[in-house]
Amino acid sequence: MLVREETDPWGLAVWPRIARKYFNIYRTSLMERVTYRGDFFLRSILRFLPLITTILLWRAVYAGSGKTTLSGFAYNEMIAYLLLVHVSRMFSSMPGLATNIARTIREGELKKYLLQPVDMIGFLLSYRIAHKSAYIVTVSLPYGLLFFVCRGYFPGWPDPTTMVAYVLALILGFFIGFFFECSMGMVGFWMLEVSSLLYIVNTMNFFLSGHMFPLDLLPGFWVAVLKALPFHYMAYFPAAIFLGKVNPDDLPRALAIEFLWVIIFVVMARCLFRFGVKRYSAYGG
Amino acid sequence: MINSILRYLRLYGALARYSLTREMAFRGNFLVKITVEILWLGILLAFYATIFSKTSVVASWSQYQYLFFIGCYFTLEGILETLFLENCHQFSELVRSGDLDLYLLKPIDEQFLFSCRHVDWSTVPNIFMGCGLMGVALYCMNWQFDLLQVSLFVVALGCGVLMAYSFLFMLTSVSVWLTRNQSLHELWWLLTTLMRYPRDIFNGAWAPMGWFFSFVIPVMLVINVPARVMVKIIEPEMIAWAAVSTIALVSLSRLFFSFALRRYRSASS
């Protein structure tokens, strides 16, 4: 220890090693992801069905109402929104994350993280980034094609500032999604069975995040409530930025609030993990 | 023949009783599941209310006609979830782990065993909630009782259930090739997208797609035919087509399943 402090007072030598460790987790996870291709492709193809039916449903709604805009959304913007929500969810949805954490705790597998020099949340984050990048690369072609076909619905590319804000919102959305799901999984330290709880939360999230339709369509009071909650960062917020529905002057403040939510969820996940490990009994395994 | 039917009925009764006993052992879970379903219905209704706060008609379906459609969908989905969905979900895991071998040795029909092993009692309330919605919709429409309409509706809904089951079962059989079909629930959910909306929204340039999914791969008939019979008009030719499709799909799903089983490699057992 003394020797290291003399030659490397800041402990810099360990960083490449740590980076290599997490990069290797990333690489292995990426290989696992592409092993079961059939399942993956079938799902990716079928994913377009809800998109088509929602577009057609909203077309029928606009036709039925006889109006050109509903709550500030023209028909084209509505469709663009519903397409953009998919991009938001591409970043923020974390299928299976909380379930896996809860299972790791329940079946006693958690001790592998406690014994080995690897942090569980760090491991899962590398793993998830691998899955996300594989997913985004694979679907970028069909999605690119879809957006190209549907380009008529879009008002055009936003200005560079908006674009930067959009990308930031997507990345922050990924972290909110990740640490939120992580925290949900940590509930497994206190409850043996969390799948039902997760199901409730995911169902609520589907609605509260604005995945089904722009939150602005709801009555005014509910719009204010839902925009104060963190869920809308996982779907509504990035899409709204792209479509210029967020006032450019408000963008820095809105992104700062989103960043604050990321920190809140990081702290929450970390705290739950620390308290959880204290009462963890390494049952099973 | 009758003996064999009776034997299967007795077996099914025993399986259903066993599932109920198991479900009742975890009452807390049962209550949570019901909460989820009520929540989901709430979200569907909030979506529905939001849409109809902006318009009075969606592709020729008025507010209450559309409410009936949603009720019909909820009922059908409830029936499928209660009877088949969980069974089909377990099938892919049996394939992956190789545990399927054990079941194949049992002296009963494989399709019966894999699709009826377990009855999911926690989704039975969905069926009642769906029926409740249909009732409310009919009441709001001042519907007058008509025996012919009701009988045709029951027949059409029965056909809908059997068609949906056949699709689900074929999707399940695919797991023999995919090995890992973790996402059957999701795949099924995606496929039901085609059932959840009135066919009339597929108009204009999209009409061929509506036609394709009604007459080539008849997914759209599942809810559209029964709902139209009850709240729109009786179309005898569509009911007949639904009946023909049902027979064809049930047979096809059976053939496809036995074809898939022959490809089963019994890995890792």
Image (spheres, coloured by chain):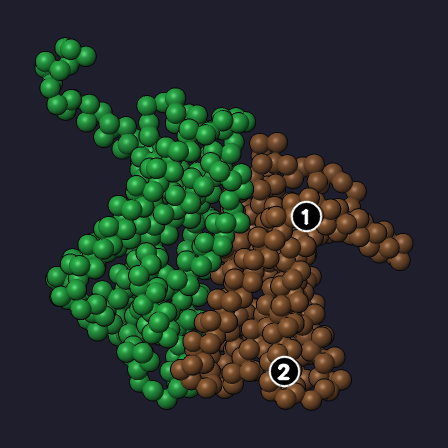
Rendered location of residue B200, percent (x, y): 50, 81
Viewer-closest of A142 and B131 = B131
User: Which one is nearer the viewer's eye here, B231 or A278?
Assistant: A278
- Return the mark for residue A147: none
Mark 2 = which residue? B138
Residue name at image x 86 percent, y 55 percent: B6
Residue at image mark 1:
B23
* Residue A237, quarter of the rendered image: bottom left
Which amino acid does the dot numbered 1 rest on?
Glu
Q: Is residue B162 above or below residue B100?
A: below
Q: State the image coordinates of residue A211 (x, y, percent, origin top left).
A: 38, 63
Helix, strand or loop status at disc 2: helix
Mark 1 burial class by Cα count in 10 Å: few <14, some 14-19, many 20+: some
Residue A248 position within the rendered picture, expressed as x and y whole percent measured from the top left: 15, 66
Quick one: label 1 or label 2, which is nearer the N terminus? 1
Disc 2 residue type?
Answer: Leu
- Badge 1: chain ID: B
Question: Is A108 located above or below residue B157 in the figure?
Answer: above
Whether discs 1 and 2 lie on one chain: the answer is yes
Residue A1 in view (yes/no): yes
Q: Residue at x 60, y 57 (%)?
A: B34
Residue B116 vertical placement versus A25 (above, below): below
Q: Is residue A132 visible?
A: no
Instruction: Classify mark 1: helix, strand or loop.
Output: helix
Instruction: Specify the quadrant that holds the C terminus of chain B.
Output: top right
Residue A171, given in percent of the width and then of the height, sits at 25, 51
Q: Is residue A101 above or below residue B253?
A: above
Q: Chain of mark 2?
A: B
Chain that the image shows in brown: B
Q: Label 1 vs label 2: CA separation?
A: 34 Å
Q: Which chain is green?
A: A
